[in-house]
Image (cartoon, rainbow, N blue to C red):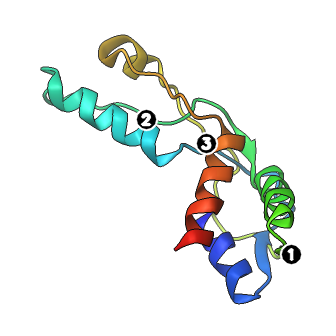
Amino acid sequence: VAKFINNVLRGDACQIYGDGNQTRDFIYIFDLIRAIIKASKLNVKSEIFQIASGKEYTVLEVAQKMQLLLKKHNYKMVLIHSDERVGDVKRNFSDINKAKTMLGWIPEINLDKGLEETIKYFLSS
């Protein structure tokens, strides 16, 4: 997300490897921080948690959402497709049930709101 925004601000195209149908699990930074704070306050030594949204989105879907949001700020996001990267993970999303159960944590910021806030941050810096 940050790389795409920086490319747009520089006037560069945003590169999507392959068809963009590979999936990722995006989380907003404040949700991540909340999870870290909750874990630091509980006795969960040596536990490993997957901290994520628990939702899977394609890279292309996220890029297209970003295009629309950036357009509202008068920025044009140009997407180009290049060859698929060798060894690229096709699906990547997390099971956050352990964090929900042991930490009492759930993500609060959905993808659209997180993208909007992230774009606003980059545009204001």
The mark that comes first in sequence, 2 or 1, is 2
Q: Is residue 89 visible?
A: yes
Residue 76 lies left or right of residue 36; in this view the side is right
Residue 90, given in percent of the width and then of the height, sits at 70, 50
Residue assigned mark 3: 25
Rendered residue at 61%/43% (across/down): 92
Q: Using the image, tell me which numbered label, if any, was put on residue 51.
A: 2
Viewer-nearest of discs 3 and 1: 1
The amino acid sitting under disc 1 is Lys
How far apart, in angstroms, are the residues tagged by discs 3 and 1? 25 Å
Rendered residue at 58%/29% (across/down): 54
Q: Nearer the viewer, residue 30 or 92?
A: 30
How far apart, in angstroms, are the residues tagged by discs 3 and 2? 10 Å
The mark that comes first in sequence, 3 or 2, is 3
Residue 32, given in percent of the width and then of the height, sits at 41, 40
Residue 117 higher or lower than 104, as above or below = below
**Mark 2 secondary-structure assignment:** loop
The amino acid sitting under disc 3 is Asp
Rendered residue at 60%/37% (across/down): 93
Residue 57, given in percent of the width and then of the height, sits at 73, 42
**Mark 1 secondary-structure assignment:** loop
Name the quadrant of the N terminus. bottom right
Q: Using the image, tell me which numbered label, if any, was put on residue 76.
A: 1
